[in-house]
Amino acid sequence: MELAAALRKVEAFAEFDAQEITALARAMTTESHKDGHVFIREGDARRSVSDAVFVLLSGVVRVTRTGDPRKALRRELAPGELFGLIALVDRGARTATCEAVGPVETASLNRAAFDHLLHSNAELACKFQTVIARQLARDFDRLQRVLRDAIVRR
Amino acid sequence: MTTPGLDHEKLLSKLELLRDLDDNELRTVAGVTRPKLYKARQLVVRQGEPADAAYVIVHGRLEASTLGADGKKAVLSVMGPPEVFGELAVLDGGPRSATVRALEPTLVLAIARSAFESVIRKHPGVAWKISRALARRLRRLTERVEDHTFLEVPQRLAKTLASLAEEHGRPGNKGFVVLELALGQRELGEMIGATRESVNKTLAAFTKQGLVARDGKRLLVRPAELRRI
């Protein structure tokens, strides 16, 4: 399975065994998109079309915020990174816009598939939830550093 | 009679990151904490060192700071109970992002990373509950970053004073909130990344507008009005 092979290389899933990777791959959908495709739009409420979490498989995805004219929060994601986690976790509005820069391949997991996957396998659920918590913790840490740099630079 | 363990549980239940945990989960977390006492000015964690534990403040005040490119210290925040710091260490190691020092005699509860991993194994729902709290904090932090890169000194100072009042203040007379922190204009300047002079000018303007007043060492502020600046 091609997707399983790609997911096995994703660092976030390093602690998943072969069966868990297979289950994850089965629940996810691979998509190819052209330059400029918008995966997630800032402000979109839950239950929109984009109600999914994504793993970037190849290409670059740019993350931007409208209230950020100095681009302190702008970021370009590299293959292997997950995006769309905050709204998946708290079911709130999307916090940023994520769009393709050049051709991009992703694997997406919509909420129904995510819930189903977590309910069907307790061990996998625990690992996946830890992956999400760790990623959010890293994002939080990165943002704190951005804030710190903003304070220190003045 | 209360036991220290129960007090710790109560304290932990107040933490935003652990707010969604049930009593059973909180008891397990409380069981892996270790109390640590620090003297005034004593170093708790140093920026750049590997992070292996989170700390919950039981009593006392601490200051998180970092060194700028120019070698000047910048105060990032003043923390007190029941705040937690270094909490990302229990999920994701990596170097400490700031230096934390006690400002006064301080008691903290330390939670080692390995101990926290055992909590998650015992209670698989904990990771998800913490993710929810992290998501909330990420939303707020994102706005704070935007404020800092976008707002001018008066707005930054107003927001910072309002936050300090909301977190550390107690109700005073005439709608003021009393801030007992020994924060001078230099420290406030370090917190918002402005010079002492511009903090002085802005505070004078706030005083004239009735948003801020001095009472000896205490600072009296009106957080709701400051938030509207």
Image (cartoon, coloured by chain):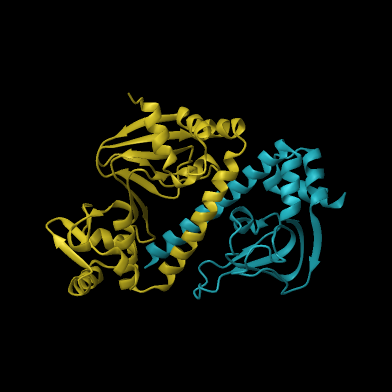
Residue placed farthest to the right in the image? A1
Q: Is residue B191 above or below residue B46?
A: below
Residue B69, image x, y percentages: 39, 60
Q: Residue at x 71, y 37 (%)?
A: A122
Q: Quadrant of the C terminus of chain B?
A: bottom left
For the point 65% across and 59% down, the residue is A84
Furthest residue in direction left, as rendered: B216
Give the mark count: 0
Colour representing chain B? yellow
* Colour-to-chain, cyan: A
Residue B142, given in percent of the width and then of the height, sits at 49, 62
Q: Quick one: B216 or B176, which is closer to the camera? A: B176
- Nearer the observer, A99 or B24: B24
State the residue at coordinates (78%, 72%).
A34
Q: Is residue B2 visible?
A: yes
Q: Residue B10, how many percent across, how many down? A: 40, 36
Q: In the picture, residue B46 is in which quadrant?
A: top left
- In the displayed structure, B229 sits above or below B60; it is below
Looking at the rendering, which quadrant does residue B171 occupy? bottom left
Screen quadrant of the N terminus of chain B: top left
Is residue A109 placed above or below B17 in the rendered structure? below
**Residue B217 screen position, x and y as percent:** 15, 55
Q: Is residue B40 left or right of residue B97?
A: left
Left or right, B119 with reference to B37: right
Q: Is residue B74 visible?
A: no
Relative to residue B80, is residue B90 drawn left or right? right
